[in-house]
Amino acid sequence: MPSRIPKALSKAYTPKRGDIIWLDFDPRSGHEQGRMRPALVLSPEEYNSKSGLCLAMPITSKVKGYPFEIALKSKKIDGVILSDHIKSLDFRARNARFCDKVDSDTLQCALHKLSLLLF
């Protein structure tokens, strides 16, 4: 197994905390979000670049009024962030593409709602 990231992958996009990215959530199971969709990245760029993974919350256009939905303020994406659907995803294998960034208030809200689930 190679000890370094292949040169072709080393220059590929690495998501940063607060980025909205498009990536493929399939395969999915049960009530999980699937298909190609936007997601909010929570993990820092350093972790993402070293692991090839990112922690992300999917975004949906189907607003249901659940307490863990976060209204998204973006010029490019309409919908809500599903803060209780966090996933660790291989962003390279899932063909992640940058879309937009969230403002700091939205990012802090997402991190706060996640903390409610963890602590």
Image: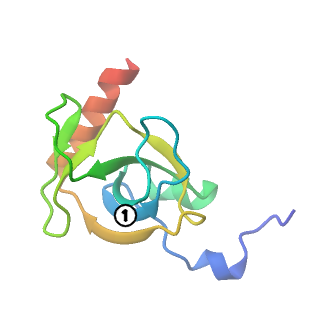
Quadrant location, the C terminus: top left
The structure residue drawn at horizontal position 69% and vertical position 81%, both measured from the top left corner, is: 7
Point out residue 104 in the picture as x, y percentages from the top left corner: 19, 51
Identify the image quadrant of residue 6: bottom right
Residue furthest to the front in view is: 30
Residue underneath mark 1: 21
Relative to 2, is 34 on the left or the right?
Answer: left
In this rendering, the count of numbered labels is: 1
Residue at the image point whose x is 36% and y is 60% from the top: 37
> Residue 87: x and y, percent?
47, 42
- Way the structure is coloured: rainbow
Per the image, label 1 sits on a secondary structure element best described as strand
Specify few, some or many for label 1: CA neighbours under 10 Å numbering under 14, 14-19, or 20 or more. many
Left or right: 29 with respect to 32? right
Residue 52, quarter of the rendered image: bottom right
Q: Quadrant of residue 100?
A: bottom left
Say which quadrant the N terminus sits in.
Answer: bottom right
Instruction: Pinpoint residue 26: horizontal percent, then vertical percent.
Output: 52, 54
Amino acid under disc 1: Ile
Q: Is residue 2 above or below residue 62?
A: below
Q: Nearer the viewer, residue 95 or 2?
A: 95
Q: Residue furthest top?
A: 119
In this picture, residue 64 sits left or right of residue 26: left
Residue shown at the point (25%, 63%) measured from the top left: 101
Instruction: Left or right? Give the position of 97 relative to 83.
Output: right
In percent of width and height, residue 114 lies at 33, 31
